[in-house]
Image (cartoon, helix red, strand yellow):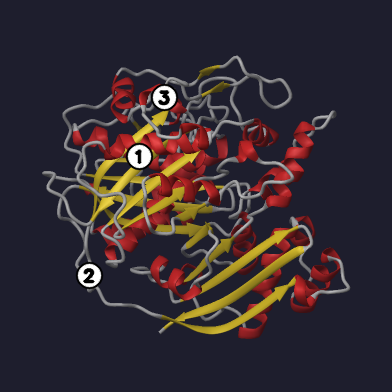
Amino acid sequence: MKGAKSYIVGKGAVCALGNSLSDIVANIELGKSGVKETNKSYANGQSFPLGAVDEEFYSKYNISNRSTYSRLEQMMISSTLDASKNTKVDLSSPSTLFIISTTKGNIDNLNHNENDYIYCLADKVASYFKNPNKPMCVSNACISGVLATVYAHRLINEGKYKTIVVVGGDLLTDFVVSGFDSFRSLSHNVCKPYDKNRDGISLGEGASTLILSDETDIPNCFYIAGGASSNDANHISGPSRTGEELAHAITTAMNEAGVNPSDVSFVNMHGTATVYNDEMESKALAVAGLADNTVVSTKAYFGHTLGCSGVLELAVSTALAEKGEIAKTLGFEETGTPVKLNVSQTTIKDKPCDVFVKTGSGFGGCNAAVVVSNRDCEADRTYETVSYSQSEAVEISSDVASGSDFKTYIKGMFASVSEPYMKFSKMDDYCKLGTTAVQLLLNKTGGLSQYDPYEVALIINTDSGCIESDLAHLDNITADEYISSPAIFVYTLPNVVAGEISIKNKIKGEGVTLVNDTDAPKTIVEEFCSGTNTKAAIYLYVDKCGERFSAKAILFVRS
């Protein structure tokens, strides 16, 4: 039904703090942290406090044919079993869709002969529950979980599905830990979000599931009331200097939900405890009018779980809000951000928590926010079908580049449609390909100057993702002479091509990166941009694997 609410009818999780959501919430109430020193070394023999999942989760959930599933797939299946145990939802129904959110998927299986390590897990998780629909896979760095929830909300709101199962998950691996260490962003202590002595991230792993439905019989059931995304168009590995773009996502989500800052009980921020991220978030909250509201980060309880984090933190925040509770920000003692925030210093109990905001920010300059509510607060909206028509399209591929090696071909192609651009030479080949395709498109259409930067959406679709950069990083960290380069690791994220394109073309609007093996541009654009102020959307299919490459860029304009 068009205009339906997205009720949160099920939620589950497996992480360092517990093997079920109820255990995790109980441990948060006790002020416990699952982030601990481990016996395993990472990043060339280093040791960090990490949020590792207890292997006891294997025995907690009865998974048939367990050996045929990877460790991450088993965690995702387990969290979904946890979420669905008290629901009436039929996960095998044609009206149910699975959306997987992950940053690196089965990255522990990566090798030179296997490149289907992200999307394959989406198929396997959905197939376990006998779901007949092709699952979606959102891989948008650290906002993947929040963004997948926003996407699910829009699909239900448009009446495309009755139920959507959002499953987030990522692993602790040397691939990931060494990559973050290359930026010198990991703390050797349990992280301290927003604190003046914060010195970096505590990484974690886990899986979490939210089941959203267009109907419920749960009294005062929380639902997704609004959601939005944005891009900083500033830097692929550093946050905005002003916080304006995250603030835009927050206020857009709040406007959709019909709430004001005074209505918001608390804000669960990304809160990674790096110097620059927490600074940016404090500025964003001030711009959004939320600096005085209660601010929470839960990263010190279970670590930063990457593509799982948005789903996990939404599940935890909702479970606590149902009890009238707000989590303590573990590790915080004294404000250390440019804008002083009202950071929770104790577990707050017996407080009406009928509206809260959850945010995320990540590499590639991406931001996302959702508003969760259990009261009838949505803004009055007219639910009309908005369509987008194709304006122009361009396509480049290895089929038409015969006789030239890729680097020579793409350098010449980019030079033919763009003024000299220093950043281009620093990109990996995947980003060069995508950036060139979009420049060809904009050269053909005359650019985007007629649109406000927030009115332009950028949607990326890929099959192989950034497989070449993944293998380059893997080879470096497994070589006899260990090397971990931030200049390579940042390009192991499929969404960073969106960051590069956004920086060059000042695009700040909605955006998502999908790792799918289907290519339906118009459908994807209309579904993802539904209910937004998007007036133009660039759809980019981009794939580069060895000598094979293909890119297709299409400009869609709101009809």
Residue 452 visible: yes
Amino acid carrying mark 1 in the image: Thr
Judge from the rendering whether residue 214 lies leftward or rightward of residue 519; answer left or right: left
Query: Disc 2 designates what residue?
Result: 381
Amino acid carrying mark 2 in the image: Arg
Q: Secondary structure at mark 2?
A: loop
Q: Position of residue 377 (x, y in %)?
A: 18, 56
Query: Disc 1 designates what residue?
Result: 80
Residue at mark 2 to residue at mark 3: CA–CA distance: 44 Å
| Quadrant in the picture for the C terminus | bottom left
Q: Quadrant of residue 233?
A: bottom right
* Disc ID at residue 28: none
Judge from the rendering whether residue 529 lies leftward or rightward of residue 293; answer left or right: right
For marks 1 and 3, the one nearer the N-term is 3
Judge from the rendering whether residue 36 lies leftward or rightward of residue 107; answer left or right: left
Q: Look at 28% across and 27% down and name the residue there.
A: 22
Amino acid carrying mark 3 in the image: Phe
For marks 2 and 1, the one nearer the N-term is 1
In the foreground, 130 or 346 = 130
Query: Disc 3 designates what residue?
Result: 57
Residue 419 visible: no
In the foreground, 144 or 455 = 144
| Quadrant in the picture for the N terminus | bottom left
In the foreground, 226 or 7 = 7
